[in-house]
Image (cartoon, rainbow, N blue to C red):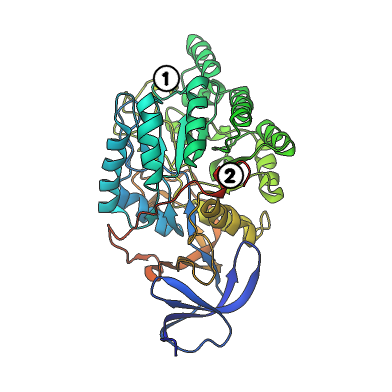
Amino acid sequence: MNPPFDLVIRNARLVTASEMAATDIGLRGEEITAIGHDLRPGLAEYDAAGHFLLPGGVDSHCHIEQMTAAGIMNADSWESASRAALHGGTTTIIPFAAQHRGKDLTAVVADYHVRAEIGAMTDYAFHMIVTEPTEKVLTEDLPALIAAGHGSIKVFMTYDPLIVDDGGLLALLTAAKAAGAMVCVHAENHAMIKWATARLLAEGKTAPQHQAAAHPRLAETEAISRLIALAELTRQPVMIFHVSTANSLDLIRAARARGVRIWAETCPHYLYLTDSAMERPGNEGAKWMCSPPLRGVADQAALWAALRGGDLDIVSSDHAPFRPDATGKFAAGPDVAFNRIANGMPGLQTRMPLLIDAALRGKLTLPQVVELGATAPARIYNLGRKGRISVGADADLVLWNPDSTTLLSDDTVQDGTGYTPYPGMELRGAISAVWRRGKLVLKEGELLARPGEGRFLPRSGGDAARWDS
């Protein structure tokens, strides 16, 4: 006879990427072992009546305890970032081990492991940021690191200290293809941004609100078009990070229609905010600076339609936390031009609550929220036991109360920035409980997890990183 369940969650309204059903869930140890009605008693029981039960969120794009190329450490340690993630219903994260020029990639990844092991409360994997695709990196470091379970690489097509040119990108795509890794790309045209920035500064347009014009829409669409061509030439799939414009969506649809294997994500700030957020007095607008920048209402509508229609695969946070003070946004000074202000917004805590709110207001369905926020990122990044509720999967579960609300304010922020980009927004739905691998780690707002409990998730690039899978 099978041992009793360690926990049975009763009367849940289960939500997966494909269906919704009233059922019970039985857990043993760290995994889901039964789904059905009238499960026999567990050693512990949890009544989920009136609640939706979703898999824990998987945030596949977030910056944690990461130094910028300008030498600014972002505001989050692994402990504070994973605390924010759990408070937002996310149980698995994929941040970046970032190589800066002159640094040894293998040493960078080893150092990042040490910091994650000390502070992480969520489970995690890494993307490796590569800025110097040298012969050693391409033929020694990357193959060994990918074989050790680091199944994805990030590349920047812009930023002077980070940019990889087309030749370097082709070399990285080729190396990734040989080793079976995914390549993720920040796609903006570097020359266009430098040209637009220089013109704005010459005209005395230095306030944060001008950052949007400094990153013109064409900078994104041109770079995405070029990236698609490079991927098509090498027959290596790519993930296009933080798509922000309707024009970019047209390029992605056209490429897929002719058989190019590409993936694409967007972020909540492009769905909920526009560039008008930066039009605040003084430097207040710096809180809403990110790259690519916030866009317009028409782009928002196109992104929502793309999520509903399956043209975008993932909603990630692109959590890039900088305090709006001398330690972060204004490390270069309180009155500097927009091009010297640190870019990025916090988002780990608000990503899933914003998506749940969208579903409860009819902009998405709850299964679409599960697909975009958990199942697709786990599938695309080859995290086989994550992002789903099924027998044999990790028991990463979040219980949502649709009859409650979540008020976003600076007072409720759990990350290190001290502010939310959505102050005063009241969201439908609230988290009642979070389980990570079967352990209750958050209950009615009380954090029960401890630093160091998170687990590294080794992985290859998987099917999504193969052109002909």
x and y percent of residue 462 in the render? 52, 49
Residue 96 visible (yes or no): no
Q: Quadrant of residue 394?
A: bottom left
According to the picture, the residue beneath numbered tag 2 turns out to be 272
Comparing 296 with 44, the one in front is 44
- Looking at the image, which residue is at 36% across and 45% down? 418
Q: Is residue 96 positioned above or below 280 on the image?
A: below
Of the 4 image quadrants, the one containing the N terminus is bottom left
x and y percent of residue 386 in the render? 48, 60
Sequence-first disc among 2 and 1:
1
Compute the Cα span from label 2 to label 1: 30 Å
- Looking at the image, which residue is at 58% across and 71% down? 14
Q: What amino acid type is highlighted by mark number 2?
A: Tyr
Residue 249 visible (yes or no): yes
Number of marks present in the image shown: 2
Q: Is residue 151 positioned above or below 234 on the image?
A: below
Of helix, strand and loop, which one carries label 2? helix
- Checking the image for residue 438, the label placed there is none
According to the picture, the residue beneath numbered tag 1 turns out to be 160
Of helix, strand and loop, which one carries label 1? loop
x and y percent of residue 303 in the render? 66, 42
Comparing 306 with 37, the one in front is 37
